[in-house]
């Protein structure tokens, strides 16, 4: 299934899988849960119809090394999952303690903590997102003008 890039109003850019039939539909933001629009790709790359000319090794052939690598990968994935769950729990707690707030009101500080943005911070974020969207649209328009017909 193809992977597309999405930009959420909360400022998060993320990738998500969708069938080609649903490529233009918004995707749920993993951070705030709002629906995010798909970004147009700046370039496309990939390999099509790749043929394997021989057997592809599935492991190093050394059981102990393979088991160790698998264990390290598993531990890394588990640590990443725990960190993600902790971030989500922190954000849910902020929203629970501040009725009326949404995921778009939460920001991350330079020390890695989350807090609700002030009105000035929200205005600055909205201005930055607007400028970014205008720039991305201008880039896309220029690309379309210079594309071979």
Image: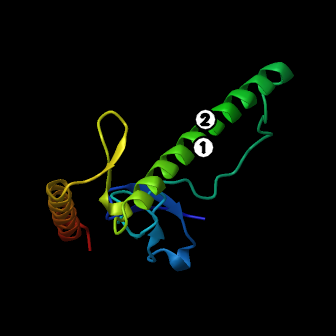
**Image-quadrant location for residue 126:** bottom left
> For the residue carrying disc 1, how many other residues have a C-alpha within 10 Å: few (<14), some (14-19), or many (20+)?
few
Q: CA distance from mark 1 to mark 2?
A: 5 Å
Please provide percent x and percent y for residue 141: 19, 69
The one nearer the camera, 38 or 93, is 93
- Left/right placement of residue 130 relative to residue 86 reads left
Q: Nearer the viewer, residue 19 or 143?
A: 19
- Residue shown at 55%/69% (left/top)? 18
**Which of 90/6 is in front?**
90
Residue matched to label 2: 79
| Residue at numbered disc 1 | 81
The image shows residue 140 at horizontal and vertical percentages of: 23, 66
Residue 19 appears in the picture as rendered: yes
Whether residue 44 is visible here, answered yes or no, is: no
Q: Residue at x 54, y 40 (%)?
A: 83
Task: Indicate whether 25 appears above or below 124.
Answer: below
Label 1: state its secondary structure.
Answer: helix
Q: Secondary structure at mark 2?
A: helix
Residue 122 placement, left or right of 44:
left
Q: Position of residue 8 (x, y in %)?
A: 36, 63
Figure check: 60 above or below 58: above
Number of marks in the rendered image: 2
Q: How is the image coloured?
A: rainbow
Image quadrant for the N terminus?
bottom right
Q: Residues within 10 Å of mark 2 (few under 14, many from 20)?
A: few
């Amino acid at each position: 299934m193809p992977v597309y890039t999405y930009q959420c109003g909360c400022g998060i850019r993320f990738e998500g899988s969708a069938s080609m039939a649903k490529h233009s539909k918004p995707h749920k933001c993993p951070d705030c849960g709002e629906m995010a629009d798909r970004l147009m790709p700046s370039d496309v790359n990939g390999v099509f119809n790749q043929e394997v000319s021989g057997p592809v090794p599935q492991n190093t052939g050394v059981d102990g090394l393979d088991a160790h690598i698998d264990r390290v990968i598993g531990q890394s994935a588990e640590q990443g999952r725990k960190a993600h769950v902790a971030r989500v729990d922190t954000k849910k707690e902020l929203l629970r303690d501040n009725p009326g707030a949404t995921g778009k009101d939460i920001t991350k500080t330079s020390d890695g903590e989350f807090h609700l943005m002030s009105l000035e911070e929200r205005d600055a974020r909205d201005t930055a997102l607007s400028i970014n969207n205008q720039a991305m649209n201008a880039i896309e328009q220029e690309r379309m003008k210079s594309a071979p017909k």
